[in-house]
Image (cartoon, helix red, strand yellow):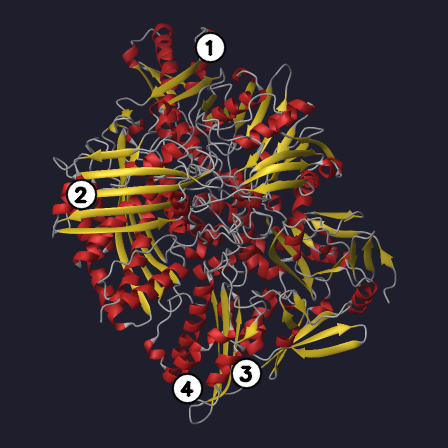
Amino acid sequence: MAASVQTEISFRLNDQIVTLDEVSASQTLLDYLRLDKFLRGTKEGCAEGDCGACTVLIGRMVGDGLKYESVTACIRLLGSLHGCHVVTVEHLKGYDGDLHPVQRAMVDHHGSQCGFCTPGFVMSLYGLWLENPHPNRHEIEKSLQGNLCRCTGYAPIIKAAEAMAENGLPEDDCLMAERKEIIQCLKSLKTENRISMADQIIVPANLEDLARAIEDQPEATLVAGATDAGLWVTKFMRDISPAIFISHLEELQTIDSNANGVTLGAGVSYSDAYGPLVKHFPQLGPFWDRIGGEQVRNMGTVGGNIANGSPIGDTPPPLIVLGATLTLRGTSGNRTIPLEEFFIEYGKQDRAPGEFVEQVHIPALGKNDQFAVYKISKRRDEDISAVCGAFLLRLDEAGSVEAIKIAFGGMAGTPKRASNVEAALIGKPWNEETVAFAIEQFDQDYEPLSDWRASAKYRQQVAKNLLHRFYSETATPELLSSLPTMSAA
Amino acid sequence: MRISELLKSNKNTDQPIVGNVHEPIAHDSAVKHVTGAAEYIDDIVEVVGTLHAYCGLSERAHAEIVEINLDAVRAADGVVDVLTVDDIPGHNDISPTGLNDEPIFAEKTVEFLGQPMFAVVATSREAARHACEKAKVEYRDLRHVTDVVEARDAGYPNVTAPLTLSRGDPEPVMKSATNTISGEMRIGGQDHFYLEGHIAMAIPEEDDCVTVYSSTQHPSEVQHMVSHALNVPANAVTVLVRRMGGGFGGKETQSNLFAVIAAIAAKKHNVAVKIRPDRDDDMISTGKRHDFHVDYKAAFDDEGRIEAVEADFSARCGFSADLSGPVTDRTLFHADNCYYFPNVVLRSHPLKTNTVSNTAFRGFGGPQGMLGGERIIEDIAYALGRDPLDIRKANFYGVEDRNVTPYHQTVTDNILERVVGELEQSSDYASRRKEILKFNKANPVIKKGIALAPVKFGISFTATWYNQAGALVHVYNDGSIHLNHGGTEMGQGLNTKVAQVVADEFQVDLDRIKITATHTGKVPNTSATAASSGSDLNGMAAQNAAQQIKKRLVEFGAEHYKVDAEEITFASNQVQLGDKSVSFGEFIKAAYMARVQLSAAGFYKTPDIHWDREKGTGRPFYYFSYGASVSEVSVDTLTGEYQVDRVDILHDVGNSLNPAIDLGQVEGGFIQGMGWLTSEELWWDDSGRLRTHAPSTYKIPLASDMPRIFNVELAKWSTNPERTIRRSKAVGEPPLMLAMSVHQALSMAAASVADYKIAPRMDTPATPEHVLMTIERLKKERPN
């Protein structure tokens, strides 16, 4: 039981603490910065977290440490910010009172033209520089996946990123110098209480309190990273109140990685999940880097990606073939189900009122398991899958298919197994003939739609070709080169 | 380099000034950009009582409006007013070419899904936007057509008069030719995706006056549209813009709507009104690059030399003309690209469709024309089994002969051979192509392609009267200089370049010059900042203003300091008067005390150009810009995914006013062109709704899409033979077309699956889907 209820949220904004006692469920950080605080260096480009013009850093306590990550303020909801440190472009200072090392590099390398995207780029690069002042090109590109520039063609921005460290290192940065004070400040804001405002927002005190809040208000919107719920507000103008914010709950951020596999709390962000997941499943690395942009990966959660049941979510296909299970917590206790069974049909999941996803467990690969996942999209990075295909294969000693699991996103109303294809493969020798026959079975398994991401014809064709590719990679890798950097991690 | 740093080390009186022409000075707003201090219209602190407007949009592609009930809208929280046709004091029209075909608010029928029907005025933007959703509209659906071929087949009309360019007689040549090809091509459109969306803020003033802050490339047109809508003379309307967060042509006419609505609301309620659509609504309700269907045939000899070309360019213009006339004209002007067509007929078909009215976009129809012409070249190359580069070279315009365009202008400044020759060498094209052919034989899944694309682009507005500009220069009596001109800053560095011209004239450091917002009250009757003409026109006008002041200063100096006029020179922040040297500031102070006029309005008009559209002859272009690129790509033939491995560019900007800024234009233009030809796809559903209306669905290039190796050079030896500003050349549009080599390289990789025996004929945009489908088709058509 939460000790008592508090009716205001507090966070640090640059070098000041702000306390708000009137926050609506749908109020975004960007509007707050621009309209209430007149901090107008942070721009609105798209209001859906895709262009990065509104990038700011959010600092939060992780254990006893302080961690800063880039996020898009346009879909970051104000109700989720209690106890955080919001850093905007106005806070950047040079060591000589002039420009910050990152800003200086951008000017020196002609990294801005119209300048509208520039504060967002500066903030993304600032986030990168704090962690990694000497990034390589891949690291730079990865940190900029969530930032669009329409003028420069990026070449000068990449040059600037490569030169940031020449102008100064993070040791002397104000966020480093003032670290102690900031940590103290954020610790002082931490509360043991539930925060609640009118019918608008609930910030539960802990997991127990969350369960109670959901039980009391099963119609409430659960908001974790808000990378989807944010768009309900900014694009569909939906009233999401009352909203229960859960991104601060440490009990949902647990990561347990051992010989049996990985167990992720539902609130673990894509970024935080990366390390342990890739340790167990190195094949997931390049794929994981293509989910959203850096800001979206810093905000969005694996649990949220599963729970909202999208047919084009990126995580379900690989997690299904890996045999992931989902633990749901509800009024009558916990239950654990195979992830695959969670998706009933388009827009319908196996989640009862009052239930919420608490964790997802992904078992380790068997000794002879071969696993691959492919994402097909118009643009390689920061795009939504047209088709996402995952394969898990185990051959017996004779070279026949002992076990095969194939799951696709973008091919049906839910992430779905290719059961006819699988049936055509199981027990058969893993050779070209078997695969050629199995490929024909895709027509039994899927009737994809045509939409703006891809035509039905292409989806079906590419799904078939991906089985071909998976076969070639396992059987005749010498004949198959990949696009050079597509798989570079 | 940054001015502030340069200035620190420039204290001596004999050193050259900082910020001279031809120097790679940083953008004048660079420091403001990176600190977030650069002010865009949405950043201006609103005056007390500012209201916010938002447009209610049509939900149908083509329908009669039977009834529109706005009661719930009016009753919604925060709503102050709902503007409809009845609230327009003047004309319900914002058609830029005066065809009266583009209403502010649709009245009886809607002609595309997303057309504005009314506007809500409310106490907050959120309230206005929410209220729009509450409108109840009863429609009676009419037949709608969104696709250009469908429109042609359905007999949809042209939105504006078509054009034919012809020279010689292709028909008999086609009949008797040794070789002919014919085919069709689809070329996709493109959304501008300026990062700053459309926005306007109007502030009412006394009498019938209003000041409008508009994110526009064309303040004078906004001024005229507002004056027509308010039914007041142009002198009652002031429009200003300090900078745009990108334009690319998307703010040449499309800003009119928002400015007009803000102004109407502001005058009606006598408060400031701001309007800013959400990104999705911006993309749905404002125009884009025209997509095209091209029908073509060509005759050629065994060496691939073109003997005749006939082509029809049909454009999806949308529901109204907007700029579709000049856009589709420019398509025809550039169908020849770099190639001589001895006999030619080119026809435009600017077709009406029930889609948003398409508009200007960097290249202004030229890129689509070129892409059609390049398709012919590629078809000939594959028909003859030759490297397309050989065919390109065989058809280059000659210097002495074979140098007349389909519009009868003689190409007199041809530097194609040098540009292409140097790039061929520096990029190592020939041996890389050999390697690639070898690679493709050895690799069954990944295939590579390489291509060299030359570009020739005509500079000048084809609307000849647009080729004029004005500037206003004040020298204040403390020696500081105020610079204003008719061009607008959208990121291209125009203000920096023009300031460099003025700094050079007065020989003072660049920081002495204050760059100010474009303002219709300071320089009137301006042309759009478009057609790459910004620095050509405004640079000359500013130079003219500066020279007028200088002339007066020299006369004053000769009299006051008793020296010959010839002995007076401006250099290094000083004025040298015979043996005596005076600082610029001191000299100006003295001139002021002697009552010298220290302000001047400059003017420029491009000489020697003329164009007779009826006859299809003239000299529409003052000069041509040239460039070439080599692209190498890798394609996954199982999925159609690809990567651009390497791009080499050599581009001609004459004697660059600012090589750093010009390089940025070349690189940025190339990547934007690459987006147009690869990942950027506009997709309408059957109801006529644009479904790629936000960055989540419309994919412009990212940092990781940049070529893995990107070598970009300016042709340092080039100089403009015409008397342009400091012999520079325009740079805004031409580099966009360099991206054609990416498309051609992708085509080659696809063609490899049929051993290069079949012309790949890949339409654009070459998304992974279109690449894979081309590959699958070629595999089926492959001769065994």
Residue beneath the point at 51% across and 75% down: A445
Instruction: Let me know if marks 1 and 3 both belong to one chain.
Output: no
Q: Which of marks 1 and 3 is in front?
A: 3
Give the labeled residue for mark 4: A430
At label 2, the amino acid type is Ala
Query: In terms of secondary structure, where does tag 1 sit?
Result: helix
Callout count:
4
Q: Residue B308 carries which label?
A: 2
**Lateral position of residue B210 relative to residue B586, left or right:** right
Would you say the residues marked 4 and 1 are in contact, meaning their CB atoms lie under 8 Å apart? no
Residue B66 x %, y %: 63, 37
**Lateral position of residue B556 relative to residue B257, left or right:** left
| Lower position in the chain sequence, tag 1 or tag 2 | 2
Image height check: is A157 above or below A442? Answer: above
Q: Which of marks 2 and 3 is in front?
A: 2
At label 4, the amino acid type is Trp
Residue A110 x %, y %: 43, 43
Give the labeled residue for mark 1: B592
Query: In terms of secondary structure, where does tag 3 sit?
Result: loop
Give the labeled residue for mark 3: A365
Residue B617 x %, y %: 24, 28
Front-most of residues A197 and A407: A407
